[in-house]
């Protein structure tokens, strides 16, 4: 009898808890959504910085330069489509977004927008019609841009040919397609920059600090480097954007290595001239830009002025060192290493050398050494597997117009062979990195 009474009391307690949750959870969710929209109403009602209506040639030219450095065309120009007309698919873990039309078409682009409308989009992440913008458009970084620079970019955009092209509807799953869900996300993770990172208009107290401040502005705001080079949480929010500790580049399958770790992509041990030159060339005897970074160099950073390239170099060299912890790993099996050597001898040795020393042509470094190459010894193997599968192509730039490339091998190598040669490279000539498994290759293929 006692056991039955205890069981009945437990069931009644459980029922009360469940009823409470059924009542409380919807109420709490409603309060959170109401609070998020209340905050959005408050942000929308705040006064904005005064803008300029000028369209002088100097302002337009400056806008063209800033749009290049900010790489607007990189996301707003679909492959094979008109420049800046939008429609480019942007896959995310939450669904596919499509970039908007930035041309001055009145119906489908920015033709009916004012300077203030454009500033709200850049600074507040809000469209002209009041819609909240998804942070695939990097207003989380652009919010630190100066009003003067935003006005200059908009002045240049208004001079571009108008293209009538509506962007496809976003393809997002539940609940990400709801504006209320986005309002809650912004409540948790986004605050408009009330005091933007100062740009070229900075009046530095010490002239020696001006390049550092300019570099910080270019990296954090205009260049929005953290959007790739910083980690994100499960909801896609940046974590410690200023730290630039590395991140996953969308669903493209590449890692944007840490810029704080000299063993990854940090440049603390490079000279200022080396960093500035690499940003504009995409290549140096120390490293080549490949994958998504090659596109950034080709479309954007090669157009940096010398002063801005040096300013970015000053800032990037000054990032605090945050070395990654060396993880213990087991050496690859003799069978995998033997297979890797066979593949390397057949497909790699002619360019990269039998000791991983690379190759020079006409006295110039042409194919990079693999011995001691930090690009192939990152703890995560995604980048080296991507280069094996899809090839490695440095950008063609004014400073380095004819780079040497690596052909893709996905059509001639099995997943096991690709894993083996990647492992062999990562564990030869003094390189120390974990073995690559066949499953890791298959996930990327």
Image (cartoon, rainbow, N blue to C red):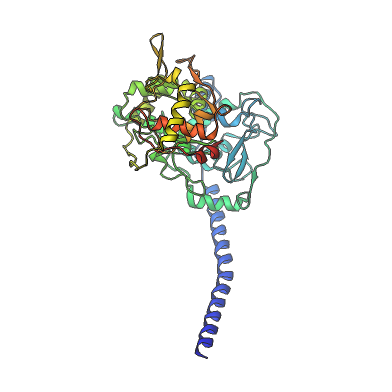
**Residue 365: quarter of image:** top left
Q: Nearer the viewer, residue 306 or 159?
A: 306
Q: Give x and y (percent) for residue 56.
A: 54, 22
- Residue at figure coordinates x 64%, y 43% from the top left: 129
Location of residue 387 in the rendering, given as x and y in whole percent from the top left corner: 50, 28
> Left of 387 or right of it: where is 276?
left
Instruction: Name the residue nearer the viewer: 194 or 374.
Output: 374
Q: Position of residue 169 (x, y in %)?
A: 68, 41
Residue farthest to the bottom?
Answer: 1
Q: How many marks?
A: 0
Q: Residue at x 38, y 36 (%)?
A: 433
Q: Establish if 26 lies above or below 195.
A: below
Q: In this view of the protein, can residue 145 be seen by the observer? A: no
- The residue nearer to you, when weighing 226 against 406, is 406
The C terminus: image quadrant: top right
Q: Position of residue 41 (x, y in %)?
A: 56, 52
Residue 172 seen in the figure: yes
| Residue farthest to the top, as pictured | 362
């Amino acid at each position: 009898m006692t056991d039955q009474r205890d069981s009945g009391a437990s069931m009644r307690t459980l029922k009360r808890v469940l009823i409470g949750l059924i009542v409380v959870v919807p109420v709490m969710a409603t309060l959170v959504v109401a609070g998020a929209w209340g905050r959005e109403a408050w942000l929308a009602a705040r006064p904005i910085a005064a803008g300029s209506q000028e369209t002088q040639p100097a302002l337009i030219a400056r806008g063209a330069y800033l749009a290049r450095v900010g790489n607007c065309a990189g996301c707003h120009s679909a492959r094979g489509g008109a420049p800046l007309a939008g429609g480019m698919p942007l896959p995310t873990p939450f669904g596919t977004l499509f970039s908007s039309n930035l041309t001055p078409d009145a119906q489908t682009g920015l033709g009916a927008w004012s300077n203030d409308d454009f500033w709200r989009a850049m600074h507040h992440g809000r469209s002209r019609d009041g819609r909240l913008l998804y942070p695939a458009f990097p207003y989380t970084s652009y919010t630190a841009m100066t009003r003067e620079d935003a006005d200059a970019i908009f002045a240049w955009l208004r001079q571009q040919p108008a293209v009538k092209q509506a962007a496809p509807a976003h393809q997002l799953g539940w609940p990400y397609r709801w504006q209320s869900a986005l309002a809650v996300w912004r409540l948790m993770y986004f605050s408009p920059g009330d005091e933007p990172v100062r740009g070229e208009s900075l009046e530095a107290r010490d002239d020696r600090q001006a390049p550092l401040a300019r570099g910080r502005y270019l990296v954090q705001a205009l260049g929005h480097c953290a959007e790739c080079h910083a980690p994100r949480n499960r909801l896609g929010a940046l974590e410690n954007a200023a730290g630039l500790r590395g991140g996953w580049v969308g669903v493209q399958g590449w890692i944007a290595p840490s810029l704080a770790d000299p063993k990854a992509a940090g440049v603390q041990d490079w000279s200022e001239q080396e960093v500035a030159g690499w940003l504009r060339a995409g290549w140096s005897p120390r490293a080549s830009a490949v994958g998504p970074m090659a596109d950034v160099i080709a479309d954007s950073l090669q157009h940096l002025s010398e002063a801005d390239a040096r300013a970015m170099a000053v800032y990037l060299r000054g990032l605090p060192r945050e070395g990654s912890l060396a993880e213990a790993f087991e050496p690859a099996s003799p069978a995998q290493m033997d297979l890797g050597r066979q593949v390397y001898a057949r497909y790699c040795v002619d360019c990269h050398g039998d000791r991983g020393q690379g190759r020079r042509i006409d006295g110039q470094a042409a194919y990079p050494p693999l011995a001691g190459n930090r690009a192939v010894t990152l703890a995560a193997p995604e980048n080296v597997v991507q280069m094996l599968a899809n090839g490695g192509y440095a950008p063609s730039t004014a400073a380095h117009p004819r780079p040497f490339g690596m052909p893709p091998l996905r059509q001639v190598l099995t997943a096991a062979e690709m894993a083996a040669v990647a492992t062999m490279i990562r564990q030869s000539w003094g390189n120390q990195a974990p073995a690559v498994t066949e499953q890791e290759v298959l996930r990327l293929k």
